[in-house]
Image (spheres, rainbow, N blue to C red):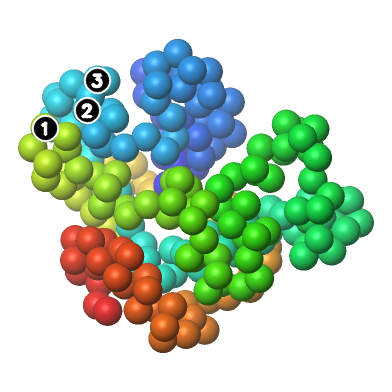
């Protein structure tokens, strides 16, 4: 979505992360103003004021929690696999070869999700690892959309699985011809939603019950 919108930005539009330009400015912007690409509605409303939440068209793309965690697992696997291949070491041995200098050069090596991946041997262990509690990609999606003032969900949510249904109307709302590129794809595919076992699905359903309820996903 960020890359789709980036093509239509005006001089007074702001994008943090997601696109080439957004990635360049997001770190200095976060350092100076405290907002970054993973900031929540609550953080935006607290810093900028409620009018920027109430008077603007606010929308978010959400995803089925099981598919979302599979995507996170595959994305981390892709990040670590690329680093391992460049070093000539097997993926399962990455943790033993990472140095403090490596983490400074490649921050992704010290992500909470990366630590969880390296410490576990499969998807079941990964989603239960305590380090994931601090990973932005693991927190419930609804938590990013709740106002700290009214404690209610803000904006329109769009389910990724129904992309073809809402894309034309979203483009009309924004006043642009909207085409979404499939960017940031995981090169390593270790798991998909269809292969997640029933025990893990029940665990995810329990952990992210707020997302299932808020966005109407069936368990």
- Indicate the position of residue 182 as horizontal and vertical percent values: 53, 57
Q: Alpha-carbon neighbours of circle 1 within 10 Å: few (<14), some, or many (≥20)?
A: few
Secondary structure beneath label 1: loop
Q: Which residue is mark 2?
A: 45
Of the numbered discs 1 and 2, the one sitting upstream in the chain is 2
Single out the mark in the foreground, 1 or 2. Answer: 1
Q: Which residue is mark 3?
A: 48
* In the image: residue 149, left or right of residue 182: left
> Foreground residue, 97 or 84?
97
Q: Residue at x 23, y 24 (%)?
A: 46
Residue 140 visible in the shown view:
yes
Q: Residue at x 27, y 57 (%)?
A: 158
Q: Residue at x 91, y 56 (%)?
A: 88
* In the image: residue 91, left or right of residue 40: right
Q: Alpha-carbon neighbours of circle 2 within 10 Å: few (<14), some, or many (≥20)?
A: some
The Cα atoms of the two marked residues, 1 and 2, are separated by 9 Å
Q: Residue at x 14, y 24 (%)?
A: 51
Image quadrant containing the C terminus: bottom left
Q: Are marks 3 and 2 in contact (CB under 8 Å)?
A: yes
The Cα atoms of the two marked residues, 3 and 1, are separated by 13 Å
Secondary structure beneath label 3: helix
Q: Alpha-carbon neighbours of circle 3 within 10 Å: few (<14), some, or many (≥20)?
A: few
The Cα atoms of the two marked residues, 3 and 2, are separated by 5 Å
> Foreground residue, 66 or 198?
198
Q: Which residue is mark 1?
A: 149
Residue 175 visible in the shown view:
no
Q: Are marks 1 and 2 in contact (CB under 8 Å)?
A: yes
């Amino acid at each position: 979505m960020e890359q789709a919108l980036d093509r239509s930005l005006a001089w007074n539009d702001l994008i943090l992360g997601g696109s080439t330009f957004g990635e360049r400015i997001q770190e200095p912007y976060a350092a100076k103003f405290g907002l970054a690409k993973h900031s929540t509605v609550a953080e935006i409303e607290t810093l900028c004021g409620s009018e920027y939440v109430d008077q603007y068209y606010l929308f978010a793309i959400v995803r089925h929690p099981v598919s979302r965690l599979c995507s996170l697992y595959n994305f981390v696997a892709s990040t670590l696999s690329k680093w391992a291949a460049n070093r000539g070491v097997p993926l399962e041995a990455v943790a033993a070869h990472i140095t403090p200098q490596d983490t400074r050069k490649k921050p992704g090596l010290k992500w909470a999700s990366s630590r969880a991946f390296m410490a576990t041997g499969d998807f079941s262990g990964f989603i239960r690892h305590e380090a994931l509690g601090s990973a932005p990609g693991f927190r419930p999606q609804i938590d990013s959309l709740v106002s700290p003032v009214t404690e209610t969900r803000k904006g329109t949510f769009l389910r990724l699985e129904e992309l073809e249904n809402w894309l034309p109307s979203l483009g009309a709302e924004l006043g642009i011809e909207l085409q979404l590129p499939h960017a940031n794809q995981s090169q390593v595919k270790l798991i998909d939603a269809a292969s997640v076992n029933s025990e893990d699905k029940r665990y995810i359903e329990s952990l992210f019950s707020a997302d299932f309820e808020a966005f109407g996903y069936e368990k």
